[in-house]
Amino acid sequence: MTRTLHPPPALALLSAAAALLSGCTGCESSTRELPAGAVATSAAPTAAPPPPARDLVHLVDELRICDLEHRGLLFDTGAGALFGRFAWQGSAPTGIQAVEHNGATWARVSDRQIRLTFVLPSASPIFVSARAVGRTSRYATVSLDDQLLGTLRFQRDQIRIASTPTTSLPADPGLHTLTVRFSGRLRDGESFADVDWIRVGIPDEDPSTYGPPTLRDVVAPAAALSGVPHRSIALRAPGAVRCAFRPSRETRLRTAIGMLGSGEGDAEIRVLRDGKEPMVLHRVHVEGGDKATWTDVELPLAPFAGSLISLELRATAATRGGRVLFGDPVLAGSPRPPPSVPPARAVVIVALNGVERPDLPPWSGRPEPRLATLSELAASATTFDHHRAPSTVVSSVIASLLTGLPPSAHTVTDAGARLPAQMTTIGAIATDSSVRTGFFTGVPTTFRAFGFGPGWSRVLEHPPTSGETATTPIDAATAWISETVRQDSGNRLLAFVHARGGHPPWEVSPKELNALKPAEYAGPIEPRRAAQVLARLRGRRRDVLSPDDRDRIRDLFNIALAGQDRALGNLIGTLKTAGLWDETLFIVTGDVASGRSDATLFAEGLDLQEPVLALPLYVHFPGDLYAGQRVSAPTEIVDIASTAIASLGLSFARKPLGKDLAAIASGLEGVERDPQTAALGDRYSTRWGNLVLSGRLGVPPFLCDLDVDPTCAFNRRDVMPLATMALFRRTVTFDLSVRAPTSQREPATIDAETAAVLNVWGAH
């Protein structure tokens, strides 16, 4: 007899929406392979060229998630530029479809209203205008934060620019929601209007016709001055492009500034930060005409290292008809590329279940005599202080570790899903390349029933009902490594161990149990059935554990983890005896921080809070690279997959999403292009440095600044609007870029034996 587990409501980010506003037609997708202050220096044309740098981010490629401004803020309805603006929704409304007018992509609207969220940088009177074609709607009312601004009037089947009156009072700076509500009634197949763009205009005395800075208008693919071409951002004045980034101490902005057309112009490069006045990094005056040349500019961004900034390229003034060009603007790192992970003969990855970072060295900040192996790794390996999980579901985290993909891409988004067979894992890649591979698990949610194991040459499942020791997966991996090396010392190998860690049921000797306090303990927590007891208690709304119960859980957890630590020591000893240690990439991490804390009690699917998402990460690189270092740069589970494959001299067929951990440890990474994202159903938590944006799609989010509020007691959304908008737009655009269709999710089908194992494990 079997039962099928069904998921909670899925995160509603639709792949169809990505194609809708990106103008993507005939796109192909595959679930197996995804597509891939500061001091300014100006170089004269005769000066020596700057040293080569490893370009990390081309700003021209980032324009879809940047703000475009010309005499106000513009919302381009084509090319995916509205992702993350639909009033905290994760995707475009279903009532917006992409259509073409004269070769340009417009939005055909059949929803009653469009709601757009944006940041107004400074206080100003505003008006709203739109370029649209009326269909069944003759007009639309426009509101700002539910306050009526005016009416846009359309003409049927005729393109028209319609505007509201200018407000008599200035609108406040900060976050706002614009609502455009259409009149009329719809029948099947009809729509209200086709919209090209919407503008939040700033009144001025410029009599010239408005030229919208749409993406097609802003990008000049090969603008040439004096015979030198650059892929450029071309701006009319006054106009700007603002993009959010988090630079490192190595990051430098490089661009060439010039004037397209006759006359002259002025350009600025500024940095905007919440709560601070804009900082001008550089100003330059440029002249156009037949003899126009480029002015090369390089700006170190080290003063802003670790901060989330909005980098602004601004055309402050220009002769009528001319444009200020920013040629090939890039954020570049060090001239020295970060080192790659050294080649390895052996890669061993151990994921400990049910552990929390504060219990482990060096994060505990105290001696851990019971954890001799982890203490030695803390001293001699490389530890990463900001390692983060992409989910609070164990199988989802391990699927990301093995595929190098986020949960929305591999579809293991809930405890009832299985890893689809078509997903490529590091084990399958290594096996196909004649690397000996072994998969050893003692955690039931990574058994074959959940899609794990295929593609590995050796697979061991150790159920908690077996009666064998809790260290069996680690011990079996140790024996397999020893036998593999004995058969042929030249064998390359990859071993993955999903160990029980501190999760019950616990193995405790009678002597150890009798030594625990209190001596006369008569509570419900006992080693063999603790997981089932805690599972029942998690379903109750009130706290039913006494202080003695919690002390008993803590002591049993520590005893169990000490046994796992000893087994890890034996594994490392075997690698050393075999002469492999200096050529081994050895990684120890966790899956979900669901250890003994009062709130979690070894649960899954918890709220996406930082203490739950924070994971330990120890890495011993071949040749003791970066031995003993603690790294503060952020890392994610997918980085482990990328590093493991690279160390074996292999690669994914697709472009990897993870980074090389050795490159991160070097400190030479130039810019954090993307934040760390975690998701569960329609909930999300996105961290970029010290800022964490979390919430539920469709609801205004919560922004926490961990530097000043470690417990996240206060919502800083309204006082940090630039950061809020940047984090949310990054969250949405990243998810849409990787998300597989919901139809590709496969439910785990659980037979009676597996159900019994899950029951003992405390999983329901």
Image (cartoon, rainbow, N blue to C red):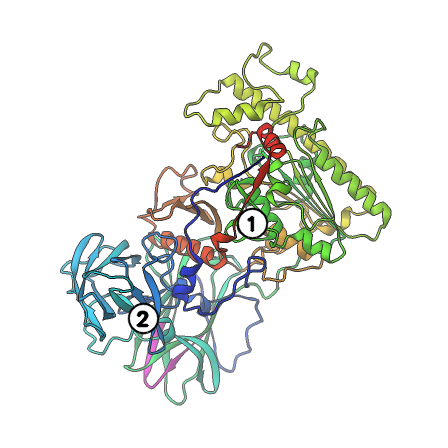
Vertical relation: 31 (above or below) 353: below
Q: In the rendering, at what x and y percent does residue 674 appear?
A: 48, 56
Residue receiving disc 2: 239
Q: Tag on residue 635?
A: 1
- Quadrant in the rendering for residue 16: bottom left
Vertical relation: 336 (above or below) 628: below
Q: Which amino acid does label 1 sit on?
A: Thr
Q: Which amino acid does label 2 sit on?
A: Gly
Real-space Cα distance between discs 2 and 1?
36 Å
Q: Is mark 2 on a helix, strand or loop?
A: strand
Whether residue 597 is visible here, answered yes or no, is yes
Nearer to us in this view, 252 or 686: 686
Image quarter hosting the N terminus: top right
Q: In this view, does 121 lie to the left or right of 19?
A: left
Q: Is mark 1 on a helix, strand or loop?
A: strand
Say if the magenta span includes residue 257: yes
